[in-house]
Image: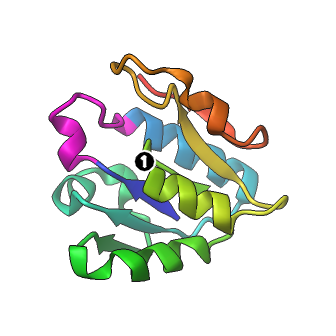
Amino acid sequence: MLHVRRKDYLNISEELNISYYKTALDHCRDSIGDLSYVIYTDDIKWVKQNPEFETASSIIEAKDTNTITDFLEMTSFKNFIISNSTYSYLAAYFGSNEKSTVVCPKPWFKNLEYTDYDKILNENWLLIKNN
């Protein structure tokens, strides 16, 4: 499962760069092997414009009417590439186990004053640089 949250983060310059997702996908391909993944996003246009995501098995667009259903689906995956969002963080937190790969950005936020988000991340999760 890969989560992309962008729209409201564009207003505060906290969206994740495509390089974060590229590095995360490369790591997962190397460590997991045959990688099949679904993208959950609030910015389907941006996702479809980036060739890095063309191997996704499907893209699910976030809508207010399917938030809970999408969340439950997200928790059912074995491996997670999360955005700097509590929505995907909680999906990985509840859905992952000791055999899961969970990739998350570090730092969680680049520009906001509060920087201790790293303290909530599981020590087994892989932190990928968030430029």
Question: From the viewer's perspective, is 107 left or right of 100?
Answer: left
Q: Residue at x 30, y 31 (%)?
A: 14
Q: From this view, report whether residue 15 is shown above or below residue 3.
A: above
- The image shows residue 6 at horizontal and vertical percentages of 26, 46
Q: With respect to residue 4, does 69 lie above or below?
A: below
Question: What predominant SS class does the magenta segment belong to?
Answer: loop
Left or right of residue 110: residue 95: right
Residue shown at the point (27%, 69%) measured from the top left:
62
Question: Who's the residue at 68% across and 39% down the image?
Answer: 126
Where is residue 31 drawn, in percent x and y?
A: 74, 51
Inspect the image, locate mark 1, and give the three-letter code of the amino acid beneath it.
Ser
Q: Is residue 48 above or below residue 11?
A: below
* Chain part drawn in magenta: 6-18
Task: Determine the secondary structure under disc 1.
Answer: loop
Drawn side of residue 126 relative to residue 71, left or right = right
- The residue tagged 1 is 85
What colouring method underlies this structural image?
A: rainbow
Characterize the local packing of mark 1: few (<14), some (14-19) or many (20 or more) Cα atoms within 10 angstroms. Answer: some
Q: Does residue 79 appear in this view?
A: no
* Quarter of the picture holding the C terminus: top left
Give x and y (percent) for residue 101: 71, 54
Residue 61 location, x and y as percent?
Answer: 26, 71
Q: Is residue 51 at least partly visible in the picture?
A: yes
Q: Nearer the viewer, residue 126 or 24?
A: 126
